[in-house]
Amino acid sequence: MVPGMVTGQGRIEQAVRVWLPVGFFLLLALFPFYWMAVTSVKPNAELYNKNLMPLLVHNPTLKHYIDLLTETSFLVWTWNTLLVAVISTAISLVLGTMLAYPLARMRFAGAGLIAMTVAAIYLVPQPLLFLPLADVINRLNLGNTLTAVILTYPTMLVPFCAWLLIGYFKTVPKELEEAARIDGASRLQTMRRIFLPLCTPGFISAGIFAFTLSQNEFLYALIFLTKSSVRTVPVGVIAELIRGDVFYWGQLMAGALLGSIPVALIYSFFVEHYVAGLTSGSVKG
Amino acid sequence: MSRSRRDFLKIAMAGAAGAALAPGATRAADKSVTMLHESSFIKTFDEYMLKTLAPAYEKETGVKVVYELTSVGSLPTRISTVTETGSGADVTMIFLLYPFLFDEKLMDVGDIAEEIGKKQGGWYDAAKEAGVVNGKWKAIPHSNIGQLMNWRTDWFKEVGVTKFPDTWEELYEVGKKLKAKDHPFGFELGHGFGDNHGWLYPLLWSYGGHEVEADGKTVVIDSDETARAVDFARKFFKDCMLDDVLGWTDVSNNKAWFAEQISCTNNAESILWLAKRDFPEIAKVTDQAMNPQGPKGRFHLLNCISHSVFNFSPQKQEAHDFLRWVMEEKQLGGWYASADTYYQPFLHAYDNAPMWQVEPRNIPYRDAMASAHLPGWPAPPTRQLAEVVAKYVTVDMFAKACAGSSTKEVIKNAEAQLKEIYKTA
Amino acid sequence: MTIRTERLIGVRQAQRRRRPTSLAAWLDRESVFSWLMMAAPIVFLAAFVGYPFVYGILLSLQDRPIAKPGTFVGLKNFIRDFNDPIFWRVAVNTFIYTGVATLLKMVGGLGLAVAMNQDFRMKNLVRAVLLLPFIVPTVLSTVAWMWMLDPAFSIFNWFLIALGMPKPGPSWLGNPYLAMASIIVINTWRGLPFYGITLLAGLQTVPPELYEAATIDGASGWQRFRYVTLPLLQPIILIVTLFSVIFTFADFQLVYVLTHGGPQNATHLFATYAFDIGMGAGQLGLGASVALMMLPALALLILALTLYMRRQ
């Protein structure tokens, strides 16, 4: 039995109990996407016609999608965004783990101080850091390269991953590690071979959020990436689909959908693994 | 995923993405000049530089020209980074108050200014306002992106008006009638950047109101003239416009125009240009006119694009020569023409250029330059003025009045803010 | 048990291959191991956060116009901020924005988690789809909302007018109160999935035995929720709320794209105001001082939150 499952009698009651609340949230979450979808296939003439019911399309067209993919660097931006997100997430998970494991498992002088400092770092806001960071980036001659954001994104992701992982690590029972230590394994071996493999759900959790935050980041990308070929999606669309005071609405919405739906599908794949990890039984021993 | 597998993936990705990650290549042995520019509303303008001018210069002199485009709104950020770090570009587009803010990092280009001015009919006064800092030319004015009245000829005709009204009061009367017919006006009162200043400063000036005097110190906003301008704005908003304009940003009036929601607004040439391309029926009934005048005259906002050379650049001499070459008539004329007069030249030689005949409705933009001034005029462009503009002091003064506050209160608040900011002047 | 034995065998094999030396023993001490392990992240954070942070503080104590050298002015920037009515408006805005949005997200997120904590087909797909508001780049969803909130095109106004409201209906971005409400709603819409899905993970670790025991004792569904679920969820609620508060407090994109702080500064936040002063007016020192003011405010909020939750 899945922990926390609600039992209900009767199929209809089950359906209502599930789909009424879930459906409510689905509606809330998705109606702007319906709007985006509808806008992305409306020809301009219909789009600007305020007399038509906004939610219906009369003459759908794929022109906006085609224009987006052929006349802008959208695919380049998407590739850049993915690259940056994956690498930043990987770096953040590694560094986050290196911080989280000692703080969750070890006792040593200074542990409390480090924990508080990491938490405090999280409070330092991006708008304060961006100019000094720009200075650092330029001194390293990394202006307008993806490395600039790959190095700066973990500044907001590492404390986040560390916190989340500390919380998760603490819930893993210590017996296996203790047994390994008794049998003579070094701490490093214990960590790598015994402990970390158990934490896959935690990594997936942290990884998903880190990935999302990274692909959504705007301020640093705005400051560091001003050349079209290195832009990520958030700043790329602002740059080319908003020219002066004209928004290319149809293309913007097409970009919104193309930029999010594939990612959601990938997540649904990972979420399955996450659930499998939780219920595999090896955690509870 | 085990750690080793994660590491492997990381390495593989890094290898595949090496090119995008590598630090910028150091300058090649042959000379090259990097020109920063904000991406133009008119694509052909950028293409002219990329495909015609840059290659021509390289052919003539062997110097490669790298034309780097930033998104609209990102140029000040990019210039900041370049000046703070001392590298990244040699010559740049620059506008509004930025030549004054970045003054110490810009090369004195008076020699180019004198030469070009002499050869091409002389500069408009407004150009000097934009490019001369403390007596020296720090930026070569290129063009103005004017902000003028756009109006619907068909709807104005319905209420018996065939020529655009000459004064604000006359415009107000027309607006009242048109709002009653469900064709209201729409002038931005929100936190955009161009369209709000584009009518509010000219309105203030045309009633004789000033924020700060030309000495750059005395705050004079609390005056009868200002009060009259504010009172006018309030009734103009209440009786002629949509409520939503209080939250408008620069894109809103374009959207409203194409949705056929409004019959009059202020804008650059972008509305007509886009209309002709995508909404030909609307384009036929769109016309452009100079700002109405008030008791103290007719004014327009100066939105001057210029070019400056960074004086810390190792290629500053090459950049200087490139700039001079671009400003020569052969290159400049072609560059202007590629943008359908979206950029209005500051040199009198172009007053009767053929490009004006391509779209005669744009001619008012040329005529407006004679009465154009920078935001905050007559105060000199200084850091205090930049702060006033960035904090939307004047815009919000008008907006709050339109939203319901009393004229006395909004002027007092604006005055307090101005006094606080100019304390250090 | 089988798994455990396998793993032990693997460790023993590794151990046989390893030769115990005093270096290895030293490396294995708790403190040495810990500090070595944390070395890389600490260095990284010191370089990319610590240094810029100190630089930022120094900046806030200077009068530093762009492209010009800075002069030390002590606390003058902060005094200017305190005398700036917009600064106080910005502070109030940010607190209201953060407070209300976080509350809505917490309540909504709990509701979402409870609703999703049931077994049904397509659960994984639904879970992923519910994350879409969080996944879609904020810039783009904000642009979509911009259109949805334009009275001429808004489906909300369309419905309200159909129900009898006079045309053109509410001005969502023109009225200062509605504009604040709008950004709160969009932020909630965007952040609720984050809350919900994380709380859901927490819900799933609650042992069913506890629910069973409570039911046997006669507790109703609501009482089960209040006395079993909520207390156990408390640590996770605390963590997620802290993150959410920090993110929302420092929010930039949403306001920058939607209203740029208007109408009349009704939606200006610390981040957008600091940006305008730093990049728009070129006053780096003053901009840094505004950004720095986020810290005590944030620290206070978080302290209050932590104390409140600990007390529960």
Image (cartoon, coloured by chain):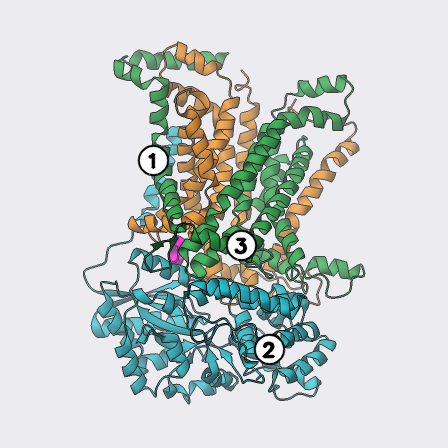
Chain colours: A orange, B cyan, C green
Residue furthest top as drawn: A182
Q: Which mark is residue C87?
A: 3
- Mark 3 nearby-residue class (10 Å; few <14, some 14–19, many ≥20): many
Residue nearest the viewer, comparing A198 with C65: C65
Residue type, label 2: Asp
Give, as a single range, the part of the protein colored magenta: A223-231
> Do discs 2 and 1 belong to a common subunit?
no
Chain at numbered mark 2:
B
Instruction: Answer with left or right where residue A149 lies relative to residue A258.
Output: left
Residue furthest right as drawn: C164
- The residue at which mark 1 appears reads as C43
User: Element under label 1?
Assistant: helix
Single out the mark in the foreground, 2 or 1: 2
> Do discs 1 and 3 belong to a common subunit?
yes
Instruction: Answer with left or right where residue B236 lies relative to residue A238.
Output: right
Instruction: Answer with left or right where residue B77 lies relative to residue A68.
Output: left
Choose the circle earlier in sequence order: 1 or 3. Answer: 1
Residue type, label 1: Val
Q: Is residue B70 visible?
A: yes
Single out the mark in the foreground, 1 or 3: 3
Q: Residue B39's spot in the image, x, y percent?
A: 42, 66
